[in-house]
Structures are given as C-alpha cells and as structure tokens.
Image: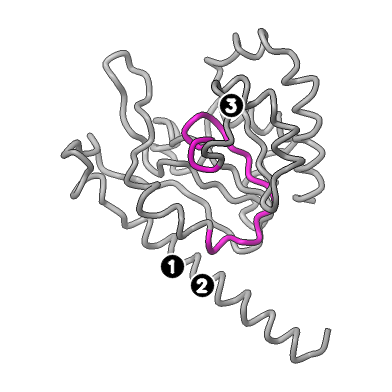
Amino acid sequence: MTEDQMSKKQDVSAKKAARLEQFTKQISACRICRDAPYKGLALPHEPNPVVRLSSTARICIAGQAPGIRVHESSLPFNDPSGDRLRDWMGLDREHFYDQSKVAIVPMGFCFPGWDKKKADLPPRKECRDHWHDQIFAQMDQIELILVIGQYAQAYHMGKKRQKSLTETVRHAASYWKNSQKPHILPLPHPSWRNSGWLKQNPWFEEEILPLLKAEVKRLSY
C-alpha cells in the first residue's frame, strides 16, 4: 500500500469514528420514548441510553435492553447475565469492555421498566425504528453479530428464523456458516432465568459454545 493509499484509508477511518462518536452523543441525548412515544406510552422513568458503538470492533453483541442494574450503572451487561455471557464468550471483563474490540447495540437502549409481575418489559420500538439501520450501516466492519433473544433475532434475521427461539438457536452453526458478512450467531438470553432451558438443551453447551468461543477468540485477540 502506498503512502497516499494509507493516508486515504486513515482519513476514511477517522471520519467513520467521528460519525459514530456523533451518533453516540445523539443517542445519549435521545428522549423520543419520553417526549414522543409510540401509542402515547411514555417511558416510566428518565431515559438513560446504554450503547457502545465502535469503528474498529469486529464483534457486535445485539441484545434485548438494559436491566435495572445496567440502567443504574450505565455499563452494559453489568449484571449476572453479563457474567454468564462473558463465560460463554470466553472473555474477561477487560476484553469484553474493550470498545475497540466489542460493540454492544441492544434493541432497546434504555431500561424499559417492569410489567405487573416485575418482569422487564420488551425493548422500546423507538430505538429500532430511529437508530438501528443508521448504526449498522456505519459499522460495516463488523464480522460477527451475536443475536441474543427473540427481539434481536427478529431484527437481524427476519424470516430466516425458525418457529421458536430454541429451534433458531439449534441452527446457530448453520446460520453462522451460511450468512454473509457479518455472520450471524443466534443465542438464548444469558439470564439466570434461562438456567432451566440450558439444562433441557445440553447441545447448546456442547455444540454452540465451542463455535462461539473460537470465533470470539479469532476476532478479538
């Protein structure tokens, strides 16, 4: 590569990083779900968008939405679900939170609140409709998207999903192998509430996790 080509490449990279930094600032200031919510159902608390964009990361974690602990700490996956996800990926906290290596873009950027049974509500649709297409158009360097849970799978996989989340995850290796860049790897939610599901589906640990760990190691070290 000539010096001129190198200079142009660096200029493109700098502009891309600047655009994503601007996106991050705009998302941090976003109050759509409070001030102009869909169907008039406003977020029941002050928004606190939690997202980690990157111009260099080759891995993106596409989850559901922050829980209450993440809402309070502003650090994604800063909870038992994050501990399990890091174990699945074979990453310690330092590498997991290295924004140059791992981007984190949940379907909802803010904690959506609880239902009457104190379970987390679904991700807000405002985030998906207003932000996601723009973000992933800019993060074109991503090579692997970990698609966690049904809402992320609906956005990133569309009609390619199976009839159930279990069957979608069961076909994870096939999705990874046959998808073009970025490769898609569907996963269940790492919530401890899914411990029963993991016991009922031992193939996940035996077949899917080795693939996940190998790909994460290849793309993050």
Residues under numbered marks 3 and 1 in contact, where contact means CB atoms less than 8 Å apart: no
Residue 156 place in picture, x, y as percent: 54, 43
Q: Nearer the viewer, mark 3 or mark 1?
A: 3
Residue 78 place in picture, x, y as percent: 53, 35
Residue for point 38% across, 35% down: 123
Residue 162, label in figure:
3
To which quarter of the image does residue 207 belong? top right
Residue for point 37% across, 30% down: 122
Amino acid residing under circle 3: Gln
- Residue hosting label 2: 18
Amino acid residing under circle 1: Gln
Disc nearer the start of the sequence (3/1): 1
Number of marks in the image?
Answer: 3
Q: Nearer the viewer, mark 2 or mark 3?
A: 3
Does 208 lie within the magenta span?
no
- Residue hosting label 1: 22
Residue nearer the viewer, 61 or 50? 61
Give SS at disc 2. helix
To which quarter of the image does residue 1 belong? bottom right
Give SS at disc 3. loop
Residues under numbered marks 2 and 1 in contact, where contact means CB atoms less than 8 Å apart: yes
Residue 221 place in picture, x, y as percent: 80, 51
Looking at the image, residue 23 lies above or below residue 15: above
